[in-house]
Image (tube, rainbow, N blue to C red):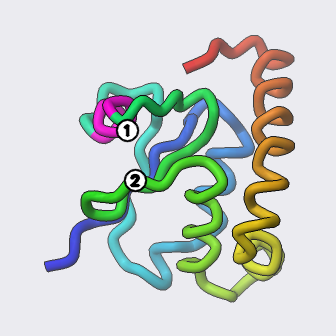
Amino acid sequence: MKQTLKIVYDGDCPFCARYVRFIRLKDTLGAVELVDARSDDPAVEQVRATGVDLNDGMALIDGDRIFFGDECIHRLALMSTPSGMFNRINASVFRSPTLSKLLYPVLKTGRAITLRLMGRTPI
C-alpha cells in the first residue's frame, strides 16, 4: 500500500494555503495530507528533525524522503494535474529544477513580507 503524501506548509500564509489547494494533487495522486506547519502534527516534527526551518519553505514528505523549498515545489509541479490555468502555469515554471531554485527565494521573500504586513508571527 502506497503511503499518503504529506505537504507541510504555513497555514497562516495566504499564498501557501492557496497554493496547496490549487495544485490539485488529489486529482492525480489520490490521498494527499495537508499539514499546517503551525500545528502539533507529528509530520511537523518529522520535518524539523531534519534541521529544516519551516519559516524558509514548505516540505513534501514522500515515504521516507523529505523534499524542502525549491525541491518541494519542483516535485509538486511534476506530480500535479495539467488541468486548470494555475496548474499549467505552475507546471511550466516549476518543472524546471533550475527555475525552481532561482524563483523560490523570491517567493519566500514575498511570503515573509506579506506575513509581516499582516502581523503574523513566524512559525
x, y percent for residue 31:
33, 71
Residue position marked by numbered label 2 in the rendering = 66
Magenta segment, which residues?
Answer: 43-49
Q: How far from the left and from the top, in percent, is residue 52? A: 47, 33
Up the image or down, 112 lies above or below 30; here it is above
**In this picture, residue 16 sits left or right of residue 6:** right
Between the residue at mark 1 and the residue at mark 2, the CA separation in whole angstroms equals 7 Å
Q: Amino acid at mark 2?
A: Ile
Predominant secondary structure in magenta?
helix
Give the percent coordinates (x, y) of residue 107: 81, 44
SS for tag 1?
helix
Residue farthest to the front, as pictured: 98
Q: Disc 2 on helix, strand or loop?
A: strand
Q: Are marks 1 and 2 in contact (CB under 8 Å)?
A: yes
Identify the residue under disc 1.
Answer: 47
Q: Nearer the viewer, residue 102 or 21?
A: 102
Residue at x-position 69% and y-position 87%? 83
Residue displayed at 53% across by 31% down: 54
- Graded by Cα atoms within 10 Å as few (under 14), some (14 to 19) or many (20 or more), the crowding at tag 2 reads some
Q: In the rendered view, tell whether residue 50 sits above or below residue 85.
A: above
24 relative position to 16: left or right: left
Question: In terms of image quadrants, where is residue 95?
Answer: bottom right
User: Viewed as shown, does residue 73 lie left or right of 101?
Assistant: left
* Mark sitting earlier along the chain (1/2): 1
Task: Give the image quarter of residue 61.
Answer: bottom left
Asked whether residue 45 is drawn in magenta, I would say yes
